Image: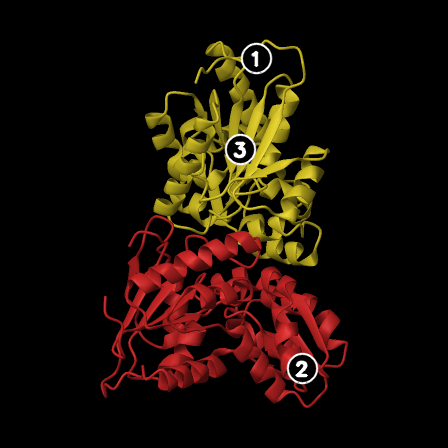
Chain colours: A yellow, B red
């Protein structure tokens, strides 16, 4: 298989969350082709062990490699926090995660008043955000909180439900009572809950996520590698899911603003 | 491999919920040996498609068969509602699900005032409870509600959290305002939330689950098949999980009232 500038960008997540990153990629790189893989048969990742998340991340990545991806976007914070280093080490094509872009966006937004990070259990346990922020500015204080119910709430489309408000109040309590001026949505599902999280955090707190910064990094890496698609036509999209789920379509169509066609991939995502 | 009365009973679930059934089995059949398999790497099942749940149920069952199980308990309502018929058709050893026992318990408890059923999306979509209750007593009215957040709430150990109270209020609203006298906890995780569900349902509603009735059916089938373990010693237990999770241990130890030792099984539960 020949990998060249016309090859697609591969993007994966445990479910629908990665589409929030795909939306930014599409906006910044309208002439690129994209393959999206959502591991909906094994969602969520964030409450599983590092070893399991690592296995899943490699299976997801291999699926996209076998589909001819020229660059891999790990559009899942849990997978990035556990597997990013190994994916970069083992694979030849460029790999972009979402933790470093999220940390960059947070450091840029913060006026020095402290940064809060919301993430899954796997992401928070890894300390990946704390390390990435500290590498950019060791003087910024970071408070990280694991929010295990946010992914099920987002996957169920309950972003405006009072359950999401109560969950946000519960998770944000230890953060908003301390001094933070910036809050990282450290899971690609959380932008779906941004309105509720923003209300609970209060207007003095700036919410940031990885999507736009990750997209900018993808563009920069493609440019440096001479892999930007030279086409002037709108790119093509393929969506693959390990389990077919109606709510992926309804939430996905709301995120991307158009109808989606998905292909079901069976056998734990290894059916090439 | 020889299957005889001394062989273990195999019990599986997507996670920790099936332990509520194991607890009843242990009480009624103290001299039996048990193997428990929790597919924690792919939990939850109830929000996935029938086709995926069917695949998982067969993989879980095969794991237990390869471990020498003499009888299979599908201690998961989602798996029972989708896969029970096929498991019974294909495998030689007896297979006991949790839907028929739950329906039996509900019909026994009801004084004719209507039965509510709480379950996962997969269970409610299948109409399995409605059919099973109707087969026992076609005159009983059944109102079924899908409660997708109850499994994550139970798996996170939030059974006394205000999030569980709010979720119970939300899910039970269409039921408690209608006339029911019995409420089926139609998912083996839900007994973990029984206190909260009971409070919201009110004292005039009797909560039932499948555990005791399923255990009685297991005893009856073993007796008929001459497979009851003749030992007078306390049986042995093995616990296998597809993902190692601390909270499985903490919740599991609370359910069974003793320390658990678990073995991690890799490769999507097919690593025999």
Tell me how many marks there are. Answer: 3
Answer left or right for A134 relative to B4.
right
Q: Give the crowd class for mark 2: few <14, some 14-19, many >=20 residues within 10 Å.
A: few
Residue ID at (73%, 70%): B173
Same chain? Circles 3 and 1: yes
Q: Give the crowd class for mark 3: few <14, some 14-19, many >=20 residues within 10 Å.
A: some
Q: Which chain is disc 3 placed on?
A: A
Q: Locate the N terminus of chain B by quadrant.
A: bottom left
The tag on residue A112 is 3
Residue B135, placed above or below residue B85: below
Residue A19, image x and y in percent? Answer: 60, 35
Residue ID at (51%, 34%): A12
Mark 3 or mark 1: which is in front? 1
The residue tagged with tag 3: helix, strand or loop? loop
Q: Which chain is disc 1 placed on?
A: A
Residue ID for mark 2: B202
Find residue B220 and report its image quarter.
bottom left
Residue ID for mark 1: A229
One can see residue A194 in this view: no
Mark 3 or mark 1, earlier in chain:
3
Answer left or right for B236 relative to A149.
left
**Separation of residues labelled 1 and 2 (CA atoms):** 63 Å
Residue B96, image x and y in percent? Answer: 45, 74
- Identify the residue at the far right of this view: B178
Q: Locate the C terminus of chain B by quadrant.
A: bottom left
Residue B101, image x and y in percent? Answer: 52, 79
The residue tagged with tag 2: helix, strand or loop? loop
Q: Give the crowd class for mark 1: few <14, some 14-19, many >=20 residues within 10 Å.
A: many
Find residue A131 and report its image quarter.
top left
Residue ID at (22%, 85%): B233
Residue B215, image x and y in percent? Answer: 43, 81
């Amino acid at each position: 298989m020949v990998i060249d500038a016309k090859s697609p960008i591969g993007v994966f997540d445990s479910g629908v969350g990665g589409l929030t990153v795909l939306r930014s990629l599409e906006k910044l790189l309208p002439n690129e082709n994209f393959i999206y893989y959502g591991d909906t048969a094994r969602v969520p990742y964030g409450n599983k062990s590092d070893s399991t998340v690592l296995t899943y991340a490699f299976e997801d990545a291999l699926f996209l490699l076998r589909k001819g991806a020229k660059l891999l976007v790990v559009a899942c914070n849990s997978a990035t926090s556990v597997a990013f280093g190994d994916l970069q080490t083992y694979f030849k094509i460029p790999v972009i995660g979402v933790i470093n872009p999220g940390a960059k966006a947070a450091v840029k937004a913060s006026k020095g008043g402290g940064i809060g990070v919301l993430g899954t259990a796997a992401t928070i346990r890894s300390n990946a955000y704390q390390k990435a922020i500290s590498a950019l500015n060791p003087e910024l204080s970071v408070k990280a909180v694991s929010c295990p119910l946010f992914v099920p709430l987002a996957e169920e489309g309950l972003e405006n439900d009072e359950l999401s408000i109560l969950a946000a109040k519960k998770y944000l309590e230890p953060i908003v009572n301390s001094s933070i001026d910036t809050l990282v949505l450290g899971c690609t599902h959380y932008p779906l809950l941004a309105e509720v999280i923003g209300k609970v955090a209060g207007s003095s707190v700036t919410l940031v996520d990885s999507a736009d910064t990750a997209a900018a990094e993808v563009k920069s890496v493609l440019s440096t590698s001479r892999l930007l698609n030279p086409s002037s036509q709108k790119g093509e999209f393929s969506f693959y899911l390990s389990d077919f789920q109606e709510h992926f379509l309804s939430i996905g169509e709301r995120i991307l603003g158009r109808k989606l066609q998905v292909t079901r991939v069976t056998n734990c995502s290894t059916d090439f």
